[in-house]
Amino acid sequence: MHSHPPKAHSKTGKKDPAHFPVAKHSVIHHGRLPTTIGLWLPKGFSASMAKEWIDRRRVSIRPWASFVDQRKFSKPRNFGEFCQRVVKNVEVYNSNYTFIFLGLILYCIISSPMLLIALAVFAGAFYIIHLKSLESKLVVLGKELTVPHQMSLAGAVSLPVFWLAGAGAAVFWVLGATLFVIGSHAAFRELETSDIEELLMEPV
């Protein structure tokens, strides 16, 4: 008779954990817990990229006290000076204008509950579609759905909610407010002495 080898037991009489079956889909991370955040982000995009972009903008931003200093605002003397101010100020205060634009978008979203709901519906639809594509390839009319296609599908699903929320009017409001605020500042903000000298040194 052939004797079977004894089953591995610990001193307490329980089975050794090493002999328990391991799930097929379990993934061992070296000292790190798996996260689900990065699973549905589009390829080539990460939170670190967004943070790096914001950090670059923050470094190049001009002091807000100087940005809104009323003593440095005046009416341009002629059309030539108007053009010089607009071009140079957009270049100098580019990061400030970017944060103003983002602030107007944030204000528009916060002040419109329906728009918040529409964005939540879009994000939820994209999240579900992308998770499904990770489990198995999504094929429509013989073609696999890529990330842009998935975003388009999520947009189509949430389109009625965006329409009810008046998203079109919100977009035009943000663009109009941005052009008015930035355009007014760029036109009436006097150039710094160093900026004027730089303009005079440029070849004609």
Image (tube, rainbow, N blue to C red):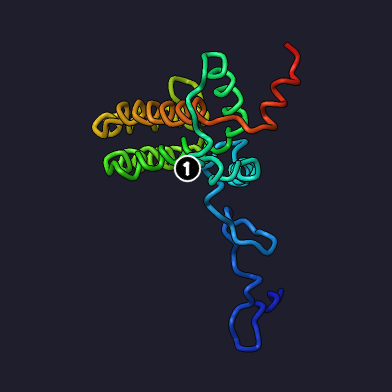
Residue type of the residue flagged with mark 1: Leu
Q: Quadrant of the N terminus?
A: bottom right
Q: Position of residue 57 (x, y in %)?
A: 61, 41
* 155 up-or-down from 63: above or below: above
Density class for disc 1 (Cα within 10 Å; few <14, some 14-19, many ≥20) is some
- Residue marked by disc 1: 131
Q: Position of residue 19 (x, y in %)?
A: 64, 70
Q: Position of residue 24 (x, y in %)?
A: 58, 54
Q: Which quarter of the figure has residue 153? A: top left
* 30 up-or-down from 101: above or below: below
Q: Which quarter of the figure has residue 152? A: top left
Residue 46 visible here: no
**106, 46: nearer the viewer:** 106
Q: Quadrant of the C terminus?
A: top right
Residue at 65% across / 88% down in the picture? 11
* 70 up-or-down from 78: above or below: below
